[in-house]
Amino acid sequence: MNAETATSDTPDFARGVAAELLADGGMLSGRVGAEPALLARRGDEIFAIGSVCTHYGAPLAEGLLVGDTVRCPWHHACFSLRTGEALRAPALNPVPCWQVEQSGGLLRVQGPPKPISRPAVPATAARPERVVIVGGGAAGEACAEMLRREGYAGRLIMLSSDPSGPCDRPNLSKGFLAGAAPAESNPLRSPDDYRAQNIELKLGAQVAAIDPVQRQVTLVDGARYPFDALLLATGAEPVHLDVPGARLPHVHYLRTLADSVALVAEAAAGRRAVVIGSGFIGLEAAASLRARGVEVHVVSQEQVPMRRVLGRALGEAIRKLHEDHGVVFHLGTRVASIADGSARLATGETLAADFVVVGVGVRPAIALAEQAGLTLDRGVKVDAYLETSAPGIFAAGDIARWPDRLTGEAIRVEHWVVAERQGQTAARNILGQRERFECVPFFWTEQYDFSLAYIGHAEHWDRATLDGSLEGRDCTVTYELGGKALAKAEVHRDLDGLRAELEFERAMAASGPANTGRR
């Protein structure tokens, strides 16, 4: 899915390019042989790295330079200009990095890519002998990967209740369900990668109990895994519909790889779907099913889709977007019962349905945390370092409620990038690095040719200000409470989204002591 490839009409940095073309703070796109490359200048320093984000292939030259890093314009991954390392999720893999020579007014890239060199971990840093991760989603996978990246060589076990390996969950309701992305794009890592990193990935592992005192995890089958440090990353569970017929085999939820595969099969065999719920999952599923030619009816108790998160103006625009693509809405009502081939609404109307998709929200999966006696607060309560009330037990992802410096409140966010970044921070804190989690929440949605990025977190706001044109799909909506901006929604304004993220980061830094952890 690369947005950029090296072509013969782009400058070959190995042959040289005029230094005057690269201004301070600027970037140039080109290639090193056949490899797409990027030159960037910071004062007297010149950097050369690969120009394609390793997440979804975005052109990094359209991103934002921040210090000695570049941020991806699409989904806000961050890469080191000095090493090419992926510093922030959602990118997990590095880009190549080359030496640059300046001579005779030319900039010339030298030799093969440099190997990544990471700072040595201080000998005094904590080194637990055994780390157990409960959960195989975004947070768990990112934690395991970062532990190995940070040089952790102890035993590392990941217990996942899912029979499938960690996968790209956003892809399940977007590209894969729409038919635009192949099945091969779903796994985050191959089984060989886990073996190569000596990560013991146990699939279909149902955890029965966590003992914070004896420091062990017990599975339903009786297997026990002792730990010195543990990450709890159990994620969220779909809210299930409680109406007659809700358990029929053609009623589906969309959370796991198996769920998405089942819906792809339904879309191939059936031509009429009822989607229950008008949140992000419901509407992304609706858009993806329309891309496959399925007739879609959306039923929701909301009067305006996604109004609670995005406000009336954006919600109405998204409704019109779907209607323009043939989706029929039934708002302000609910599904009263489901039968083979149909769904009956509370209004008495009956909708034909070869299959049904339920997307009415999720709940944090906190049963294990409760059993272990961890402090709960509409999720699992953690401190600024993502540690729970039990020393040595950390929590990340959809279950974690952490103290957010920007809002001044404890918040819990159910978004992929947040979960991955929490997993990365938890890994470093498991190793004793004491890094505060100070990520600005970010998520994105893609529906048809419409793209929206949401930066920040506003559970409540008293003012939503529109800048630009919704009709022209070029706008920013800023959500404020008491005159303070808490979040921004960017419609087809990628660079503005990166600037908003940086603006919120600076606001957080100004509100309290600096992060003492290594970045």
Image (spheres, helix red, strand yellow):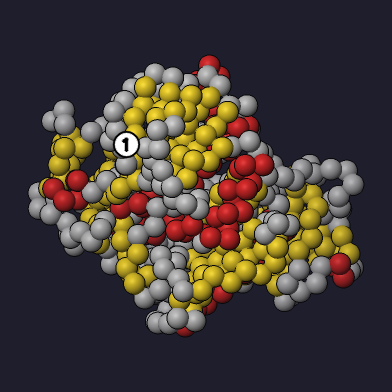
Q: Is residue 432 left or right of residue 278?
A: left
Question: Where, quadrant-wise, is the N terminus in this rendering?
Answer: top right
Residue pushed farthest front? 348
Asked if residue 87 shows in the view, the reply is no
**Picture coordinates of residue 515 (x, y %)?**
41, 74
The answer to whether 321 is drawn above or below residue 427 in the figure is above
State the count of labels. 1
**Picture coordinates of residue 11 (x, y %)?**
86, 52
Closer-to-camera residue (477/421): 477
Residue pushed farthest top? 269
Q: Secondary structure at mark 1?
A: loop
For image coordinates 62% across by 42% down, the residue present is: 323
**Picture coordinates of residue 138 (x, y %)?**
41, 46
Closer-to-camera residue (60/131): 60
**Picture coordinates of residue 119 (x, y %)?**
48, 62
Type of amino acid at the residue the image marks with label 1: Leu
Closer-to-camera residue (345/275): 345
The answer to whether 207 is drawn above or below residue 103 in the figure is above
Closer-to-camera residue (375/489): 489
Asked if residue 234 shows in the view, the reply is yes
For image coordinates 70% across by 63% down, the residue present is: 469
Residue pushed farthest left? 214
Q: Is residue 396 left or right of residue 58?
A: left
Q: Which residue is mark 1?
A: 241
Residue 385 sits in quarter:
bottom left
For image coordinates 72% across by 45% down, the residue present is: 3
Crowdedness near tag 1: few (<14), some (14–19) or many (≥20) residues, C-alpha within 10 Å: some
